[in-house]
Image (spheres, grey):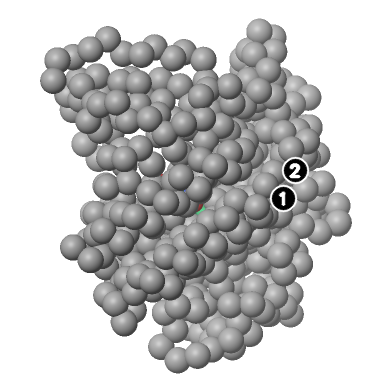
Amino acid sequence: MTVTEPVRTTVGGPELPQERRVVTDVPGPRSRELQARRQDAVAAGVASVLPVYVTAAGGGVLVDADGNSFIDLASGIGVTGVGNASPYVVERVHEQVDAFTHTCFMVAPYEGYVQVCEELAALTPGRHAKKSALFNSGAEAVENAVKIARASSGRDAVVVFDHAYHGRTNLTMAMTAKSMPYKHGFGPFAAEVYRVPMSYPFREPAPIDGPGAARRATQMIEKAVGADQVACVVIEPIQGEGGFVVPAPGFLPALASWCRENDVLLVADEIQSGFCRTGDWFACDHESVVPDLVTTAKGIAGGLPLAGVTGPAEVMDAVHVGGLGGTYGGNPLACAAALGAIATMHEQDLAARARTLGELMLGRLGELADRQPAVGDVRGRGAMVAIELVQPGTTEPDAALAAQVSAACHAEGVLTLTCGTYGNVLRFLPPLVMPEDLLVDAMDVVAANVSAAATS
Ligand code: PLZ
């Protein structure tokens, strides 16, 4: 194939044609050219799921350098819930970039940072007095939540769960469960991190309800760590990278009660599940769980790097003055983007949109599971949905099938992601502004490819 001039779509956002369109091989010639340049310039350790080079994105699509238009079931790993180049985000960032780009909040502050903290206090679970600190990435937020928990409790131990993902920095690698690719060869890891069993209904060896699974975890904490040694229990209310694991009902409330009884801070890592993704502002809201600290990132700012830790004023203020911060944390452009994104979530009621998209996906995928025994489980909440692929009639993971289906979807113009400790989960994280007909089309492509690959 000769290298053709790219279709130059420089303006993205919701006005982009909302369609699946594959006009070249995937990746096409322009993307392959860029991929060759990348191979010489970009470290091999940084991988890409689908090496098509994006030129514009918006609504439910990504457009690449060859003019292909992909249905986006990734949202940049759960980031662009409001869509790419979302109008209020673009507007606010434009205004901010014209005014000033950076001062460092620790040097000379600005209103946007304060406003984002006010929003976080209002939106996160619980009506108590709350304060926040802002950072650049999810991992950095988790690190800081642990710092705050340790400073306020005077204790060292951090409890995390099987299948957890909390980041790639040294402390958060220790907190993350999966070795390859996140931890392999990168140790030694931070001390005083203890892992206990998660509630993972599909993979329980014997039936156990939510409170029972919580007791299993807290008994292990009491035996192996000692409750009075624990600064915090950190949990993703719905696990992300670990496989979109939704704990059994009652698990999170029982865990929260144990934490309260033992003066242990409960940290909800809502980095992937937060900001309307699961059909409410936060995944904890579904069972009315009020965590002590909440970590946020990803969906908060429509694609600009921003993260936060929010918690009770007295816990947050236990850290000495100057103990928290960083050069870029709460950068003015990122704060402007967050205020635009949050306004969009309110105005378009994206939590309701997430529920609608979720019902649509669960419906379609449920029908697929009924006729396809390779689909062992269909689960999720709101627009955070996944299927787990297995050897039919067992719970034996089939990672090869997940990879094969994902590649086939990519070739047909649907950007899917895999995840899970066993790599056998296909997960779906559409932008919450995705048109429904486009999502139906994407689900049909997924279903057809699961059926084709499972019976081949
Ligand atoms: N906590 C729950 O989902 C990021 C990671 C992708 P950062 N998940 C996507 C990858 O392979 O690096 C995540 C998360 C939860 C923390 C994080 C970390 O957030 O912004 O990637 O540091």
Q: Nearer the viewer, residue 446 or 351?
A: 446
Q: Residue at left 50%, top 60%?
A: 364
Task: Determine whether label 1 and label 2 are within 8 Å by CB.
Answer: yes
Residue 338: x and y in percent read: 67, 32
Residue 108: x and y in percent read: 71, 20
Question: Which picture quadrant has residue 136?
Answer: top right
Locate the C terminus by quadrant: bottom left
Alpha-carbon span between mark 1 and mark 2? 6 Å
Q: Is residue 179 left or right of residue 225?
A: left
Q: How many marks?
A: 2
Quickly name the residue at label 1: 352
Q: Residue at left 72%, top 78%?
A: 257
State the SS at label 2.
Answer: loop
Q: Residue at left 41%, top 25%?
A: 63
Quickly name the residue at label 2: 349
Q: Amino acid at mark 2?
A: Asp
Q: Amino acid at mark 1?
A: Ala
State the SS at label 1.
Answer: helix
Locate the N terminus by quadrant: top left
Residue with the most extreme left position: 1
Q: Residue at left 63%, top 20%?
A: 90
Residue 59: x and y in percent read: 56, 32
Q: Does residue 115 appear in this view?
A: yes
Q: Nearer the viewer, residue 50 or 358?
A: 358
Residue with the most extreme bottom position: 206
